Amino acid sequence: MPTTTLAIILFVATYIGLLALPDLRAYVALGSAALFVALGILPLAELLPAVDWNVILMIAGTMGTVSLFIQSRMPARLADLIIARVPDVKWAIISLSVFAGLISAFVDNVATVLMVAPVALGIAKKLGISPVTSIIAIAIASNLEGAATLVGDTTSILLGGYTGMNFLDFFFMEGRVGLFFTVQLAVLAATLVLLMMLRGESQPISASPAEEVKDYFPTWLLLLTVALLVVASLLPIPDGFPINGVICAGTYLLGLGRCLLKRDTKQALSSLREIDLFTLLLLASLFCVIAGVRRAGVIDLVAQLFLTVSGGNLFLMYTLIVWFSVLLSAFIDNIPYVATMLPVVTALNASLGMEGSYLLYFGLLAGATLGGNLTPIGASANIAALGILRREGHQVKAGTFMRLSIPYTLAAVTCGYLLIWLIWKP
């Protein structure tokens, strides 16, 4: 059997297993990665390099820091402040999703989820309701805003580096409004849809005495993490250096060291236990699976189809890139996909005599970044969000996630798709 065909079969079987067996996702992905190596699709020497250690370190470090943040009682205090200012559960969820989205425009999506989710958990515990809807809303809002700025998501960084765009180009470029404002209108459309879907969540919220914060150091530590991530995104970091991961792991070690200096071993051990090894194993294994699929030429083969199917029709080509990117990114990591498609878009521009045009690039970014919202495994932020819920005792089925994520995503993508065409068509 040809390697490409074998890789496709194994890839499809893997994602069916991930969707059907949510409790065993990490082991399904690990077994799939092992099969890619055993079958010779992914050489053993390429297994460890396939893992994005920047992401793994970033998630692990942020989990630890967020645990210290939770223990300080600051999330509970923030929950009280939100409860005091909104009339019911519906508006509390909307407020959290918008808040998470604004943070995610400047900070990695996963880090945003890990920072904001404790606030949602605090509200849910105080009201005695399930946190599932609010955590899902936080995750999908974070993914949506990731395309708004150069530093919002890895895919934006890839696009900026490939095309030479700087931070301000995402706001205004060539006398036109940039992606930032397009994404904000998409956020508005998606939030209105979310508001309609939550119309039944009318449980009133009553204010209660605000929690006392035990220790402000974890809050400053979290803010330091955010500030360093933003600064690092603007610096000329050598390719391949896991700067975000080093920052998140480093700031957590700073907090851990402070616990040990205070001889508070209970707090230190508690924060270490909050580092979710199940989620980290799932992500590391998925990176290996995608590396195997890419090495087998599957992603390149799919990309080549755009050249054949679209012919010379610009609107059809643009439509295919946006919506196929949405579909594909719902099931595979969008980082290798975007990295593969950027040269293809350049070739498509050349074939149409559109060198220097950003239409197809922006369509690719919008489709690939927002498409990850469709399924619970389409984006690292979604996986992290479900990991948080799992630790709280909530096993979320794919159908539960997608009942909220599909309408939200379709509203956002449709709005972005139309606006990008109207603003950037030659």
Image (cartoon, grey):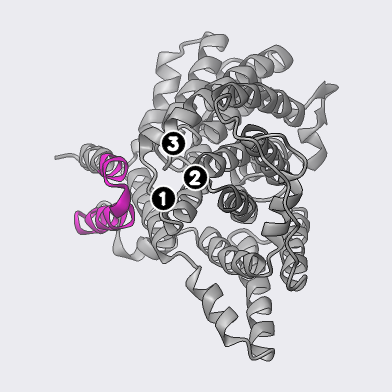
Q: Measuring from the top left, give residue 172's x and y in whole percent.
A: 83, 29
Residue at x 28% of width, y 58% of height: 27
Total number of numbered discs in the rendering: 3
Q: Are marks 2 and 1 in contact (CB under 8 Å)?
A: yes
Q: Is residue 26 magenta?
A: yes
Residue position marked by numbered label 2 in the rendering = 130
Task: State which region is magenta.
Answer: 14-40
Say if mark 3 contacts mark 1, CB within 8 Å.
no
Mark 3 and mark 1 lie on one chain; the one further toward the N terminus is 1
Asked whether the residues under the numbered discs 2 and 3 touch, taking CB atoms below 8 Å apart as contact, a structural biologist would say no
Residue at mark 3: 401
* Residue 141 in picture, x, y percent from top left: 61, 37
What secondary structure is marked by label 2?
A: loop
Q: Nearer the viewer, residue 303 or 57?
A: 57
The answer to which of marks 2 and 1 sits earlier in the sequence is 2
Q: Amino acid at mark 3?
A: Phe
**Residue at the spot of label 1:** 394
Q: CA gap, disc 2 to disc 3?
A: 14 Å
| Secondary element at tag 1 | loop
Q: Residue at x 78, y 67 (%)?
A: 220
Q: Type of residue at label 2?
A: Ser
At label 3, counting other C-alpha atoms closer than 10 Å, the crowd grade (few under 14, some 14-19, many 20 or more) is: many
- Where 314 falls versus 337 (above or below)? above
Q: What residue type is disc 1 on?
A: His
Residue 166 lies in magenta, yes or no?
Answer: no
